[in-house]
Amino acid sequence: MTVSTSTPASTAGSRVAEGLRAYLLIAGMWIRAGMTYRTSFVVTVIGNLLLSGMDFVGILLMFSQVDSLGGWTLPEVAFLYGLSATAFGITDLLLGSSEVLGARIRDGSFDTLLVRPVPVLAQVAADQFPLRRFGRVIQGSLVLGWALFAVDVDWTVPKALLVPVMLVSGALIFGAIFVAGAAFQFLAQDAAQVQNAFTYGGTTMLQYPPTLFGKDLVRGVTFVLPLAFVNWLPASYVLGRPYPLDLPTWVTYMSPLAAGVCCGLAGVVWRAGLRSYRSTGS
Amino acid sequence: MTDALTEGFIELDRVEKVFDVRKKTGFLRRERHQVRAVDSISFTVARGEMVGYIGPNGAGKSTTIKMLTGILTPSGGRLRVAGIDPSRERTRLAHRIGVVFGQRTTLWWDLPLIDSYKLMHRMYRIPDARYRENLDRLVELLDLGALLDVPVRQLSLGQRMRGDIAAALLHDPEVLYLDEPTIGLDVISKARVREFLRELNTERSTTVLLTTHDLSDIEQLCSRVMVIDHGRMMYDGPLTGLHEIGDGERTLVVDLERELPPIEVDAARVVKIDGPRQWLAFPASASAAPLVARIAAEYPLVDLSVREPDIEAVISRMYAEKATS
């Protein structure tokens, strides 16, 4: 029996630090490897930028026919779009590689990650670090930047602060879904598409005003899978738009809390998934 | 900790691994049954030993290795490596063990070999001087110099295996697990890998546990061999003892110039004839050289080869022995 002197909290903290260090090591190596072909890197980033911009072109086309969508103007929808796309883009860049976990379990190469002295999640997420996905982040922030100038809002300090809070909390909420989705692949190795339905599907939904959707769906993404905290709830407040559900104002500021709860749950689910793998094997 | 330094560097005490297998037998109907991949296995390996762990496919070899590395959690029994419970302290143990999976690589597939090593350097926190020294030595011994800048996916199987072995040893592990290290390798690569392992074991006294289903790996490397089948330990002892049990017969395959009646020599008998090719069985304990000399003197010999009894044959004889004794 080994005697551990550290408290559970400090070991959890050091595990996170270890994971981040490993993540940076692995991702750094992939970035350096990717940078050896600079032209090809620039081309793929631009390609990715244009491709992910297509859905915004779709929104622009809609607005060439109508003046408002669910009562929201083009700059307001662009505000939603920019927040959702940027937050999602950051997460997709940092954790998108985890969707191949199921494939790695199936071909057995997942075992090789378990014999290394660093947290497995960091290895899975940093593998093949997809720098090209930076294109989506650029595209999302361009739309957001334009929307910030174009929306008709009396900016106050709390409202201005909500913008970075939404981006960070949003990225964390999406991150929790990515990790939980990856954990689900321990049970069903071909479940990557289920994960995509929530991640890609979620970001697409959040690019449109909540007033377009049925109340049950809005309730679901507010109270069950709290995607509404990525942008819908805080952005409705910033823009002075009524939210389809009657909620007190303080809920607007709860995005960081929702993100924290999601990340905690995702961590628990991940550990359970990994434990089930280690007791059954592939 | 002190006992780990002397005896029992690797200790297994009645270790079991049971898998729950669920099979669909109809709509919504599932049948559950349990498979004992490892069934109450006990053994100890002392520091610096080099042990062969053999058995047919599906015998439980890889499951055992996976439990020893912490990849899998045992269902029962007690297991310690260097005093550490692998499944509970997997990452701590990782610093002290090296693992080579013959069928898959631990290297980063799309990156040059040297990048994997640089990453290992940081990941295992190997001191700079130690890393450089180890890398230089491994590159020289495993002849990797020309391969360092080649992406791993472009390496041949033998080259990749040498690259993998180097990767597993950069952090000076005290024990090296090799799961089928020579599978699919050509004769020259096999010889090179074996020579390297022998040196590693004698010079650095690294403990080596080797699974294989190639008996000649064991013959050339290990003084001790453990045989496992259906998750149970069938034999644990010197290789010579295994030959006595399995004793079989080795087979001399002879190609003659033309079709001839069965060859007549003492100490061997013809078991099969196919055109100019004849199969002769002779005791495994006897030397093949005088037999070959005699045949060559009396018959028009074109080519020949000697076949060792394979593990399946040895094991089936073990069962037979058990049944009669």
Image: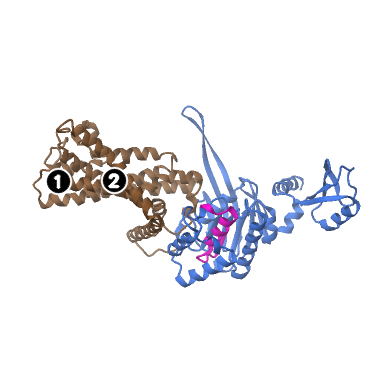
Chain colours: A brown, B blue
Horizontal side of A53 relative to A23 (left or right) equals left
Identify the chain of the residue marked 2, using the numbered disc in the image: A
Residue stretch rendered in magenta on the structure = B153-176
- C-alpha separation, residue under disc 2 versus residue under disc 1: 24 Å
Spot occupied by residue B226 in the image (x, y as percentages of width and height): 65, 55
Residue in view at x 39 percent, y 60 percent:
A25
> In terms of secondary structure, where does tag 1 sit?
helix
Instruction: Find out whether the residues at labels 2 and 1 contact each other: C-beta distance under 8 Å.
Output: no
Closest to the observer, A31 or B220: A31
The picture quadrant where one finds residue A245 is top left
Residue type pointed to by label 1: Trp
Q: Is residue B154 on the magenta stretch?
A: yes
Spot occupied by residue A191 in the image (x, y as percentages of width and height): 41, 39
Disc 2: which residue: A88
Which numbered circle lies on residue A250?
A: 1
Closest to the observer, A151 or A97: A151
Residue A56 visible in the picture: yes
Residue A261 visible in the picture: no
Identify the chain of the residue marked 1, using the numbered disc in the image: A
